[in-house]
Image (tube, grey):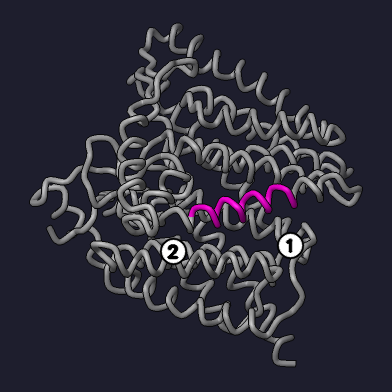
Amino acid sequence: MDMVVKRPLLNVLLYCALAIFASSMLIVWYDDVGWHDQQRIFQIALLWVVALVAWKVPLRNLNLCAFSGVSLLFLLGAMSSLCAKHPAWAFIEWARYLGLFLLALLVGQLAREFRWQQYVVHLVGACAVLSVFQFLVSYLTVVFSGMHFFTAEMLFGGFSNPRFLAQFQVLAMPALAWLTLYHFRFCGRLNSGFAVLFFCGLVVQWCLALSLAGRGLWLGLMVSSLLLVVVFPRFWRLLVVQVVAALAGALSFYLLFRVVPDWLGAEVLVQDSLRMGLSNRDVIWRLAWDMATANPWLGVGPMHFSAIVNSVAAHPHQVVLQWLSEWGVGATLIALLLGGVGVWHALSFLRQQDAQDMDASLWLSILGALVLAQVDGIFVMPYVETWLAIFLGLALARWPGCGPDSNFQVVSLRLMTLPVLVILGYVLFFDVPHLQENTYQQLTENGKMWAPRFWGVGWIPWND
């Protein structure tokens, strides 16, 4: 009887927690911090709530091999953090990943109910559509204000760097395609309206993607879509929706960023999607490789790429090099093995007749994000890495293969919540209240530059 009373309250709590986190790309909740720091604060708060809930609520069980691999991964991460130059910062990064793991398992348990799956995907779609609305408002403001100067910084909000939007798009665009199909199949004026709304949102997202010229986004969408159409052609409807939306988005881009500005005599600053070069990624990739070869077994410590200031970025923009340099060879190999097994398991499930369009949409989102992570900071930016953990939780809920109930795993997972509660709780309740003044001190007195990692000024430590 107790659980019957508590479960609806728990659902409401988690519905609200996810919605509040999702709003961190739409609403300025803190005037004194940037988008990146706001999203980090909301991420930490969400993970702290998840760890609190996970102490009482059973999580999705993994099979023995997967759980053993994850446990060994975090054990190696803890050892790397202890040996790091700045252990406190290293353990913050370690606890954040642990919290994301718990979030995926909690969603994997709750989303066994289809209403939870619908809620999560519709929440992503709502964020994507609302971001489109904000863009259109900004665009009309530029047109009618007389400024007549079209730049990404003026038109796009929600992220400290407008091009970070591409990291969210790689997850959201397949979800928008599924939402379009899902509502289109139902009769009724309301469902038809939702189908049109989500499709229009997808069209404008393609327009935004063209204006931001994110080559990593093209790569992620292309690889995941090609694999889907070659290996699982029965999901062709999802790809048809994407192709039609992409063509309409290209036309919208031409009208909004070529025809209208020419008519107004306005200046447009957008990057070329076909530009060549690595945008200095080769510099930070070389730095990460040097760190990895100098510290092969445990790495320099989680987050410690940002302990050595360089002129490019506070993270390597490549997930394998990031883990090799910071966590070491052992942890990286385990992570790659777990990821490879997960991709293979997804392929096996999508071959079955039980697989549906939502499963294919999840495949497109997750694989696209993993591909984008090879050239971008997917596993650094708070907003997108949290959504990726949530999508992985949906996959755990929908794709069979989890292990049986195990008291050992239940106890182990509860123990894992403790460092998340303590470490992230300390950051949330003691560091965040002083974030603005500490950020100002790093930028002025210590001469550090804006380079997102954990905080917007990502270089560590902060007491230099």
Q: Is residue 133 magenta?
A: no
Which residue type does callout 2 highlight?
Answer: Arg
Q: CA distance from mark 2 to mark 1?
A: 22 Å
Identify whether 282 is placed above or below 93: above
Locate residue 333, reporting x and y percent. 53, 53
Specify the segment rendered in magenta. 332-345
What element does badge 1 sit on? Answer: helix
Q: Is residue 337 magenta?
A: yes
Q: List the residue tagged with mark 1.
A: 397
- Answer left or right for 207 relative to 457: right
Rate crowding at label 2 as few (under 14), some (14 to 19) or many (20 or more) other CA atoms within 10 Å: many
Name the one closer to the observer, 147 or 150: 150
N-terminal-most mark, 2 or 1: 2
Locate residue 315, reporting x and y percent. 35, 44
- Disc marking residue 233: none
Identify whether 375 is placed above or below 65: above
Q: Could you say which quadrant of the image residue 108 lies in?
A: bottom right
Q: Residue at x 51, y 61 (%)?
A: 20
Q: Is residue 255 visible?
A: yes
Screen quadrant of the N terminus? bottom right
Q: List the residue tagged with mark 2.
A: 96
Screen quadrant of the C terminus? bottom left
